[in-house]
Amino acid sequence: MDVPGTMRAVRIAEHGGPEVLQPSEVAVPAPRAGEVLVRVAAVALNNTDLWTREGAYGRPGDPEALSGWRGPLDFPRIQGADVAGRVVAVGSGADGSLLGRRVVVDPAIYDSEGPDANPVGLMGSERDGGYAEYVTAPAGRVHDVTDSPLTDDQLATLPTAYGTALGMIERGRLGKGETALVSGASGGVGLALIQIARARGAKVLAISSGSKTDAVREAGAHEVLDRAQDVAEQIRAVAPEGVDVALDVVAGDLVGSVLPLLREGGRWVVAGALGGYEVAFDVRRLYLHNAQVIGSAMHTPTHFGLLMDLARQGTVQPVIAATYPLEQAALAQEALSRRGHVGKIVMHP
């Protein structure tokens, strides 16, 4: 396939506001040994894009330090973790059968090659990502979804949001018939949690704002709780037996107020801090009830493989909130930061 020498991309050369997102003309990256080159059809936005751009992740011992996902960034950096597209070139030693196939890229950089490896880096943070017409990726992290009934836009929403959701659900061992509590339910990860938990046969309680209740219920929530009201009181009313697994991307005050409502042996899985990273709770409610607090960063290779099976089957149906051309990356990130939408925002290079 013919590949041009240059491409359009949006890069950041420093941490800051949306103004640091700079449209650029750059060289098309050449796939190295074991890599493929993907022509990007769609790239989805995530909160990690905002936090990486702002340097909001902090570092161990210095929570206010400007930092990317797992440490200082190498600038300039092309953002964008979530890519769907087609393979247009392969490097030496890469699987040539991928050429021309429609694919989704697993954006995680893992600490080992094993099936249960932990993510220690992220495309768009620790390596260049999909805010561009082309992106390289290791061939082993590229998944063929040519026959999926999902659109390219829907496929692009899967890696971070649905990967994070499936990782949370797997690490929290959510089973059929259990009660799951989902915070931040109208966001990309929240909607993914609802859909996957519902498919698992769980009873889903979702926390959202009043204006988004219908959309959250349509995604599959059995009960929608208004975050502006007393959440603990609402849980007691609709699930007096308690919660088996909390799937939480908000943290903050929610943990202290709702942790006592976990059932015996309950699990509280945390994968975000939209409500604040400082948390206080009564530790007696943890050890006296054999509860667990579990940190969950994205997914393992095994989790991502399960997610791609769901994509090929069309088991999940991602909701697209809005689309933007690549040149409007700053506007797209501003829209994401306002959190007025339901579903995922996607850009088209």
Image: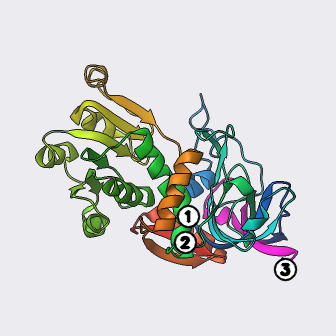
Asked if residue 179 lies in the magenta stretch, the reply is: no
- Frontmost residue, 276 versus 113: 113
Rendered-image quadrant of the N terminus = bottom right
Q: Residue placed at 28% from the left, 54% from the top?
A: 206
Check disc 3 and report the residue beneath it.
2
Q: Residue 133, how many percent across, how many down?
A: 73, 73
- Mark 1 near mark 2, Cβ–Cβ under 8 Å? yes
Ranked by sequence position, the earlier of labels 3 and 1 is 3
> Which residue was labeled with disc 2?
346
Instruction: Give the mark, 1 or 2, whose residue is nearer the N terminus.
Output: 1
Q: Which residues are magenta?
A: 1-24
Disc 3 to disc 1, C-alpha distance: 28 Å
* Neighbourhood count class around disc 1 (C-alpha, 10 Å): few under 14, some 14–19, many 20 upward: many
Q: Is residue 5 left or right of residue 330?
A: right
Q: Which residue is mark 1?
A: 45
Horizontal relation, residue 57 to residue 238: left or right? right
Q: Are marks 3 and 2 in contact (CB under 8 Å)?
A: no
Q: Residue at x 67, y 37 (%)?
A: 111
Query: Mark 3 is on which residue type?
Result: Asp
Horizontal and vertical percent position of residue 237: 11, 47
Would residue 207 be found to the left or right of residue 317 on screen?
Answer: left
